[in-house]
Image (cartoon, rainbow, N blue to C red):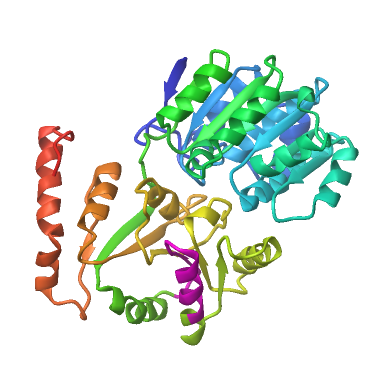
């Protein structure tokens, strides 16, 4: 596998790339006209690196955080190459919201070439999706389970696939889709182009690449665990019973849109109700909500109808909304990797953002896992309701010293 890395410190960012543009990347003039019309003028680092490789027909592994333009990094080459050959392009995504978002992103480019798309997601009726497949779409975007449903009914013929994209591959594995993905891959032609995009690169993804890709070129825009460049972070050590009142103070202090994360769907519902009781508009996205309810919540958040969106990690990957002022981790995530994904929902498209996390005094190990992943300590802020001795009890201050000492000595393997 060839590997090309563009670290954060030398990545050609959209704001400072001198002369960088979509011209010269091998993109067809027709697509360049579309990009100009929708005011896409400067490629993001992942687009700059991945698009030329994919247009050449190479298998690509793209490692980049959320909000870095991955959809167009694979969407542009997929449409361009399909316009030059027969067959179908297949995009697999972990969540319904992300699949819908990808389908919407494809519309403008694909339609210009007369290509139809079909979006196959669970929680939606099968019949309209079956009808969409009968219209011979050139591009199919699907969640793994629903795609297998259509394959079992012979609505979708995997033998026609000439290009495959696995988007948010790490999240698909986290959500337990590995068996479904392996089953789908067994039915696909070996002679195809494969692109895999992920925010992290665990060993399971490397195994998929080794067995299902042909001499893939790996493009890493930022190391695994790298947080969004323009997001500032803040941590409050706070007792569980004090969270609600402190949340009310934060919502009064910040005036923009807020994305709040909860560990469980039951708590997400409670928090959303509490926020409404505080006098703020709020919607919720989690697995207990139907697909229409989730779409209505997300569209309402995008339009400004809801100021606060409460979400769980399982439903968060399709939340691609520019202008989110604040991300609140009301509960720390069970998996430290999700911390990076969560706070990456703000500070998108060149804008700044802020992330605030609540940690109870007994969550020292959870905070430690996050800090080890991002290789820096979370700035701890004090609020009036928590006496200073509470910080000492938490052990977090000594933890920060430990991390600084071990980082200096480069002894990250030590167990704290």
Does residue 314 appear in this view? yes
Quarter location, residue 168: top right
**Left or right: where does residue 58 sit relative to residue 395?**
right
| Residue at screen point 81% across, 32% down | 138
Q: Quadrant of the C terminus?
A: top left
Q: Is residue 370 above or below residue 266?
A: above
- In the picture as drawn, the residue positioned furthest to the front comes out as 152
Residue drawn 30% across the image and 78% down it: 241
Could you say where residue 262 lies in the image, as x and y percent from the top left? 43, 64
Q: Camera-side residue: 75 or 214?
A: 214
Residue 52 as seen in the image, left or right of residue 136:
left
| Number of marks | 0
Magenta residues, as a range?
255-273
Q: Residue at x 65, y 51 (%)?
A: 96
Left or right, 350 with reference to 157: left
Residue 34, image x and y in percent?
75, 39
Q: Work out whether residue 79 can be spotted.
A: no
Check if residue 121 falls in the magenta segment. no
Residue 201 pos. (x, y %):
43, 31
Q: Is residue 184 above or below residue 212?
A: below
Estimate the x, y position of residue 233 in percent, counting from the top left: 31, 58
Q: Is residue 56 left or right of residue 400?
A: right
Is residue 320 or residue 193 the one in the foreground?
A: 193
- The one of 380 and 295 positioned closer to us in this rendering: 295
Quadrant housing residue 282: bottom right
């Amino acid at each position: 596998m060839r590997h090309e890395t563009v670290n954060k410190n030398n990545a050609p960012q959209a704001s400072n790339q001198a002369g960088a543009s979509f011209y010269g990347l091998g993109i067809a003039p027709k697509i360049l006209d579309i990009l100009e019309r929708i005011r896409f003028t400067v490629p993001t680092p992942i687009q700059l690196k991945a698009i030329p490789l994919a247009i050449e027909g190479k298998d690509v592994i793209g490692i980049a955080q959320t909000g870095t333009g991955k959809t167009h990094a694979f969407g542009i080459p997929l449409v361009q190459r399909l316009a030059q050959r027969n067959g179908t392009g297949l995009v697999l995504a972990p969540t319904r919201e992300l699949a819908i978002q990808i389908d919407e992103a494809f519309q403008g480019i694909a339609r210009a070439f007369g290509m139809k798309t079909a979006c196959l997601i669970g929680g939606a009726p099968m019949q309209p999706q079956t009808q969409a497949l009968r219209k011979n779409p050139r591009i199919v975007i699907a969640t793994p389970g629903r795609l297998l449903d259509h394959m079992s009914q012979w609505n979708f013929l995997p033998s026609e696939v000439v290009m495959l994209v696995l988007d948010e591959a790490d999240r698909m594995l986290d959500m337990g889709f590995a068996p479904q993905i392996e089953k789908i891959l067994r039915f696909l032609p070996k002679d195809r182009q494969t692109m895999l995009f992920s925010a992290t690169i665990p060993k399971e993804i490397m195994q998929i690449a080794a067995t299902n890709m042909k001499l893939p070129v790996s493009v890493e825009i930022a190391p695994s665990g790298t947080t969004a460049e323009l997001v500032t972070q803040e941590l409050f050590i706070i007792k569980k019973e004090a969270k609600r009142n402190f949340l009310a103070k934060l919502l009064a202090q910040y005036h923009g849109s807020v994305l709040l994360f909860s560990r469980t769907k039951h708590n997400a519902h409670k928090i959303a109700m509490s926020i409404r009781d505080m006098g703020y508009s709020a919607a919720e996205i989690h697995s207990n909500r139907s697909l229409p309810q989730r779409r209505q919540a997300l569209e309402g958040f995008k339009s400004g109808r809801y100021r606060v969106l409460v979400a769980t990690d399982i439903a968060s990957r399709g939340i691609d909304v520019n202008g989110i002022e604040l991300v609140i981790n009301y509960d720390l995530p069970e998996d430290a990797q999700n911390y990076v994904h969560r706070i990456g929902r703000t500070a998108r498209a060149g804008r700044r953002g802020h992330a605030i996390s609540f940690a109870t005094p007994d969550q020292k190990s959870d905070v430690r896992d996050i800090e080890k992943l991002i290789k820096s300590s979370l700035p701890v802020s004090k609020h009036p309701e928590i006496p200073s001795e509470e910080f000492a009890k938490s052990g977090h201050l000594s933890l920060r010293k430990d991390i600084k000492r071990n980082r200096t000595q480069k002894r990250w393997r030590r167990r704290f």
